[in-house]
Image (cartoon, helix red, strand yellow):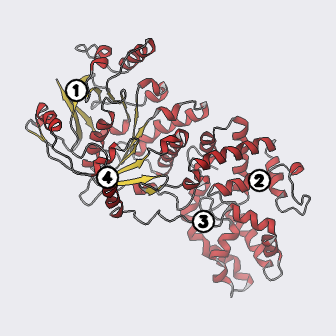
Amino acid sequence: MTASNDSAADTSDRIFIGKGEQSAWLPLALANRHGLVTGATGTGKTVTLQVMAEGFARAGVPVFAADIKGDLSGISEIGESKDFILKRAAEMDLTFQPDRFSTVFWDVFGEQGHPVRATVTEMGPLLLSRMLDLNDVQEGVLNVAFRVADDNGLALIDMKDLRALLDAIVPESIKRSAGGDDDPLAPLRKAALGFGNVTRASIGTIQRQLLVLENQGGTKFFAEPALSLKDFMRTDRDGRGMVNILVADKLLQSPRLYATFLLWMLSELFEELPEAGDLPKPKLVFFFDEAHLLFNDAPKALMDKIEQVVRLIRSKGVGVYFVTQNPIDVPDRVLGQLGNRVQHALRAFTPHDQKSVQAAAQTFRPNPKLDTAKVIMELGKGEALVSFLEGNGTPAMVERVMVRPPLARIGPITPEERKAIMDASPVKGKYETAIDAESAYEILQKRVAGTAATADSSADGGIWGHVRAIVAAIFGTNVHRGRLSTGQLIARNVTRSVTDKVVGGMVADVGKSIGGQLGGSIGRSLVRGALGGLLRR
C-alpha cells in the first residue's frame, strides 16, 4: 500500500497503523517495549493485529501470533480489492496494493500446521503444575520427582516417562512390589522421601490430572523432536519476516494448556536468546491472543515469573503484544510494561462495564481534545484510540484513528490453500514424525526386569561400571538437556571407539569421545527454562 501523501507512507524505521487528525506510527526501535491491543468482540482487534503483523513482516521482523478464530490465516494470501477496503483506503488518502506474506502454520495437534512439541523436562515443574492445576503440596511433590529424575539421569520426555517416575517414587511402605533391598526402585523412593513427605494421595492426584491433560491432547505435545525456537526467527528470500501462525481454535478448548504453552514459548525465548540491548528493530514480535487466560487464577509465584520475563525479554530484542478484551484483564504490574496501546470500542451496559471503561481511559496519556472515556464507547468498527511510544520512550497523547486496511486477505483460507503452504514450508518434514527415544519409562522398565542390573554387574562388562563412575564424577549424570544418562552416552558414543583400547587409556578415550558433545550442551543441561523450577547451579 502506498500513499499519495508521504506522511502516511511506511518508512524503514516505523510502521503506519492508522490515521485521524494525526497519523499513528509505531516506531520499530521502540516496538520491543511491548504493547496491548484491546476491545470488545467484533470491534476489529484481529484486523489490527494483522495490520501490525504485516508491518513488522515488511520491516524484516519475524512474527509469531496465535490464530483463535482462523481469520488471521488470510495473511498468507493475496489481498482482495473489495469495496469496503477501497473505500477505507480512499478515506485515508491511500492507494491499495494487495500483497501476501510468507507464512508457516503450527498446530499442537499436528492437524492444520506443523506439530509443536516440547519435552516434560523443558516444561519444568512450575509450568506443568500450572497446566495440571495442582495445589502447593502437589506442586512440591512434582518438584521432588523432577529432582529425583535429575539426580538419577532419568530423561523426562513424554507423559509415560513422568507417569513411570511418579509410580516409582510412591513411598516404600505402601508400594506393592518386591520391596526390601532387592527392589531395584527402592533407591528412588528413598531419595524422594529424603526431600520431604511424598504421599500416595498427592501422587494419585497428579496422576489423575495427567489423565485429564492426556485427554486434552497432552500426549501429542509432550514428545520429540522438540520445537527449535530458531525456526520462528526466519526471513524469506525477499528479506521479509516470516509470519508464524499457531492454529489455536481447537487448542483454546483447553484454555490452561493454551496459556501455559504460550508462556513456555515465551520463557524459552527469554532463556535461549542472547542479550541484544536497544536494536533498530525487534528480532521477533510475539502476539499473545486471549491474554486474560494467562492471568486467570495464576498463583503469586507464577505471576512474579511472568512479570520478570515480560520486563526482561525486551533486552533480548523480543516484543510481546497482549490481545484481550479489556486492559483490566492484565495485572497492573504487567500492564505497566506495555508502552504501545491500541484500544478498540468497549460497551458499557452495566455499572461494572462503566468502571471498566473508566479504567481503560485512565491507561492513556490524556489528550485535551478528547474525552477518552466517552470516545471509547463511541468508536466504530475499525476505529481505535492509539498511543505509541515516542522517540524519548514516553507515551504519545492518545489519538482517535481509523486503522488502515490490511494488504493481505481478510478472513480464513481454504484447506487446499493451507495444504499448499505447508507443502512449501521451510520446515516441512522436520517435525511431522514423532520419535520415541529411550528415556525414563524404558530405563525404569529395564531396572524392574533386572536387565540393567545384570548389564552393570556382569564380569565381561565390569570395567564399564568403573568408567561410568569416573565420567559421572567429572561431568555429572544429567547431560544433553536431560535426555541421556551417562550410561546411555557411553553405550552409544564410546563403546565402539574404545573396545580395542587398553584399560590404561580407557578414561582418556572416554573424555575425547564425549567431550565435544558436552561442550555445546552442558550449559543447557545445567539450566532449565526460566520458569522451569531449577536455579542455575
Measuring 78% from the left and 78% from the top, which residue is drawn there?
Answer: 463
Q: Quadrant of residue 297?
A: top right
Q: Amino acid at mark 3?
A: Asp
Q: Is residue 489 above or below residue 349?
A: below
* CA gap, disc 3 and disc 1: 53 Å
Mark 1 = which residue?
A: 401
Mark earlier in primary sequence (3, 1): 1
Contact between labelled residues 4 and 3, with CB atoms less than 8 Å apart: no
* CA gap, disc 3 and disc 4: 33 Å
Q: Quadrant of residue 327?
A: top left
User: Label 4's element?
Assistant: loop
Mark earlier in primary sequence (2, 1): 2
Q: Nearer the viewer, residue 48 or 380?
A: 380
Contact between labelled residues 1 and 4, with CB atoms less than 8 Å apart: no
Is disc 1 surrounded by few (<14), some (14 to 19) or many (20+) residues within 10 Å?
Answer: many
User: Label 1's element?
Assistant: strand
Mark 2 = which residue?
A: 167
* CA gap, disc 2 and disc 3: 20 Å
Q: Is residue 60 above or below residue 452?
A: above
Is disc 4 surrounded by few (<14), some (14 to 19) or many (20+) residues within 10 Å?
Answer: few
Mark 3 = which residue?
A: 436
Which of discs 2 and 1 lies nearer the camera? The answer is 2
Q: Quadrant of residue 478?
A: bottom right
Q: Quadrant of the N terminus?
A: top left
User: Label 2's element?
Assistant: helix
Mark earlier in primary sequence (4, 1): 1
Q: Amino acid at mark 4?
A: Thr
Mark earlier in primary sequence (3, 4): 4
Measuring 7% from the left and 38% from the top, which residue is drawn there?
Answer: 4
Q: Amino acid at mark 2?
A: Asp
The number of callouts visible is 4
